[in-house]
Image: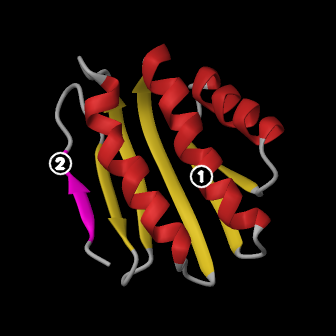
Amino acid sequence: MKELIIKGTRQNPNIILNQEKNIFEFSGQSLPENVQKLYQPILSWIDEYSDAPNENTAIIFKMKYYNSASSKVIFEVLKKFNLIYKKGRDVKVEWFFKEEDEDMQECGKYYQELLDMPFNFHSL
């Protein structure tokens, strides 16, 4: 499966989705003008990945900030990975946040409450 890389900018996150290397990473900020345009290829990639996922999948979130529109689509991303977890695969989220950034930690905990897959929280 071809990897998907989106280079981060001031408004778009850095995203690496690479099944072969088992890298699923979201980092930076997400403030795109058009959330659907940015995230649609990501959602499609995850749909394709879910047809034949790796035995173990660790999704790494190192987001500094994202707006409310991005929050909704990030939840869609996580729901797609959660479906893979519900099919019996080992899927987990590694949620990183700055120690002083309680909002980002709370966002991760909120997603954790809504989903079945395990979350691990790491302060930086």
Q: Amino acid at mark 2?
A: Lys
In the rendered view, would you say 85 is above or below 79?
Answer: below
In the rendered image, which quarter is residue 54 located in?
A: bottom right
Give the residues in magenta.
3-7
Q: Magenta stretch containing residue 93, yes or no?
A: no
Alpha-carbon neighbours of circle 2 within 10 Å: few (<14), some, or many (≥20)?
few
In the rendered view, would you say 48 is above or below 70?
Answer: below
Residue occupied by mark 1: 80
**In x, y percent, where is residue 116?**
82, 52
Residue occupied by mark 2: 7
Residue visible at 78% across and 63% down?
86
What is the total number of numbered labels drawn onto the structure image?
2
Residue visible at 71% across and 55% down?
120
In the rendered view, would you say 117 is above or below 90?
Answer: above
Q: Amino acid at mark 1?
A: Lys
Residue 98 in sight from this viewpoint: no
Which mark is first along the chain, 2 or 1? Answer: 2
Q: Is residue 123 left or right of residue 61?
A: right
In the rendered view, would you say 28 is above or below 56?
Answer: above
**Who is closer to the viewer here, 51 or 9?**
51
Residue 71 in sight from this viewpoint: yes
**In x, y percent, where is residue 94?**
60, 56
Q: Please identify the dominant SS of the magenta region.
A: strand
Q: Is residue 3 left or right of residue 115?
A: left
Q: Is residue 76 left or right of residue 10?
A: right
